[in-house]
Amino acid sequence: MSSNHTLTTGSLAHRVCLYFGKHRGEVLNDADIALKFDAERKTIPTLLHSAALAQYLAKRPGAPGTGAIYSAGKKLDEALNTEPFDLAAVLQPQDPPPAKATAKHEGPPIPRGVISPGKVPPAAKAVARPQMDISAIEIVVRTDVPLPTNEGPAKRVSQWLPILDKLTAAGMSIELPHEAMSAVQKALINYRKVTRRNIVTRRTGPKTFGVWRLADLPAQEQ
C-alpha cells in the first residue's frame, strides 16, 4: 500500500509516531495512549486511523475491553522523515481542546433586550452618583421645633395589640390559626421593643400555633 499520508505536526498521530521512533519495541493499547498523551480514549481509533492505514503504525486487535494494540509500523521511518525530535516534547499534550458546544435557541425569535438561554448577561456598569453641592443648600437653625415621638414600631403592631395585650402576666398563652403565625412573629419584633414583654410563639398543631408570655425582658438603659 502506498504511504502518501502526511502527518500534521503536533497531532496525536504525529506524536505517537515520534514516540515509537524512540521505542521501536514497545506496544501501546488505546488506554495506554489515552493516559500517556492526555487524549480522549474514544477518539483514538479515529485519530490514528490514517497513520495505521499508511503503515506508519502497526495495529492489531487487543484483548476485550482494552481496544486495539499499536506499535511501530513498516513505514514509520517515512513518517519521521529523518527529522530530529525531542522525546520530552512528544510526551506533552499539544492537541487543541475540543470546542465547547453552545446551546442553540429553537423557537420564536427572542425579543430585543431579553437574554438568550445559555448566555450570561453582561455585568451592569456602575453609575456614579452626582455629588451634592453643599454650598447651594440654605441652612436655617431653629430652636422652637419639638422632637417628634418615635411611633414607628407602635404603629406596626397596633392591629395586634388587642390580642397580645391579653397576655397580662408571665405563664399566660393563647392559641391562634396557623395562617396568622408569620404576621404575629413580625409584629412581636416591634412589640417586644415597645413593651419589653418577652413573648414567644410555637406550633401547637397542624393548623394552630400558640403565643406564650415569659418573664419580661430587662428594661433598656436610657
Image (cartoon, rainbow, N blue to C red):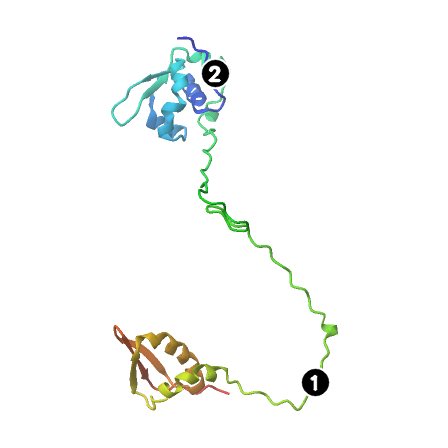
Residue 170 at x, y = what percent?
32, 88
Mark 1, secondary structure of its residue: loop
| Structural crowding at the residue carrying mark 2, measured as other residues with C-alpha within 10 Å and reported as few (<14), some (14–19) or many (≥20) | few
Residue 141: image tag: 1
Residue 68 at x, y = what percent?
31, 22
Residue 146 at x, y = what percent?
61, 90
Mark 1: which amino acid? Val
> Does the rendering let one see residue 134?
yes
Q: Residue at x 38, y 23 (%)?
A: 46
Find the distance from the CA under tag 2 to the CA under tag 1.
91 Å
Res 51 → quadrant: top left
Q: Is residue 162 above or below residue 67?
A: below
Mark 2 sits on what residue? 6
Res 138 → quadrant: bottom right
Q: Is residue 120 above or below residue 193?
A: above
Mark 2: which amino acid? Thr
Left or right of 76 on screen, residue 64: left
